[in-house]
Image (tube, rainbow, N blue to C red):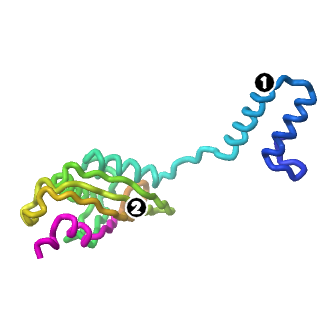
Amino acid sequence: MLAKAQGRSWGGNYIHILLTLKNRNLSMRKEYFLFIFLLAGSYACKHKARPISPLIDLVNKRFDAMNRHDTNAIAKFYDDSALIQSPNMQKTEIGPKGIRAVYGRYFTTSPDMVYNISRILPGDSSVTVEYTFAGTMRHLENSVPSYMLGKYYSLKSCTILETHNGKIIADITYFDQVAFLRQVGFFDQH
């Protein structure tokens, strides 16, 4: 009775059902509740909750740990031999120890750093994440010029995570280094 019948749309079927029931002398109140029940049932059938992809779950948990500045929680997502790379890094870091070092530096320099995911694009064994990150340069490393102290920055970024057996085996992050330098005053000095 709920199937698409005689070329009518789902809504047309509901109206047909209600008219049929009205002809059987049901009260308007019962018709209304039946209509709402049928409409909700149709919505539930068409919009079943989909299970969250393991990769999306991993990304959400990783970014939650990043926003808590919990380097140990972040490191748990990484394989011991994971490669952590960025064109903006001086060298490739390896495994949980490397990721703790990278994010430890970020969180020390910018203790107010926050991450906001814009889009997650999962594949079979890799996932691409577009996001913004923002913070203020509060504690500068020795090699960082003093004019950057107190400068706020907000950057768009993209990270590609490759996984194997539920662990990240490669983390490649891209962001606009020129935009960063502009925001922290580099070009004002030169």
Look at the numbered disc 1 and give the secondary structure of its residue: helix
Look at the numbered disc 2 and give the secondary structure of its residue: strand
| Residue farthest toward the right in the current orientation of the protein | 23
Q: Nearer the viewer, residue 83 or 122?
A: 122
Q: Going by the image, does 100 lie left or right of 5? A: left
User: Total label count?
Assistant: 2
The picture places residue 111, in percent across and down from the top left corner, at 19, 49
Q: Nearer the viewer, residue 142 or 83?
A: 142
Q: Nearer the viewer, residue 119 or 101?
A: 119
In the rendered image of this protein, does residue 22 appear above or below residue 78?
above
Residue 104 visible in the snapshot: no
Numbered circle sitting on residue 130 = 2
Asked if marks 2 and 1 touch (Cβ < 8 Å), the reply is no
* Residue sitting at x 48%, y 52%: 54
Q: Amino acid at mark 1?
A: Arg
The picture places residue 177, in percent across and down from the top left corner, at 25, 70
Where are the magenta residues, as a range? Answer: 171-190
* Residue sitting at x 38%, y 47%: 61
In the rendered image of this protein, does residue 5 appear above or below residue 179?
above
Numbered circle sitting on residue 29 = 1
Residue 172 in magenta? Answer: yes
| Residue 20 picture quarter | top right
The picture places residue 7, in percent across and down from the top left corner, at 87, 53
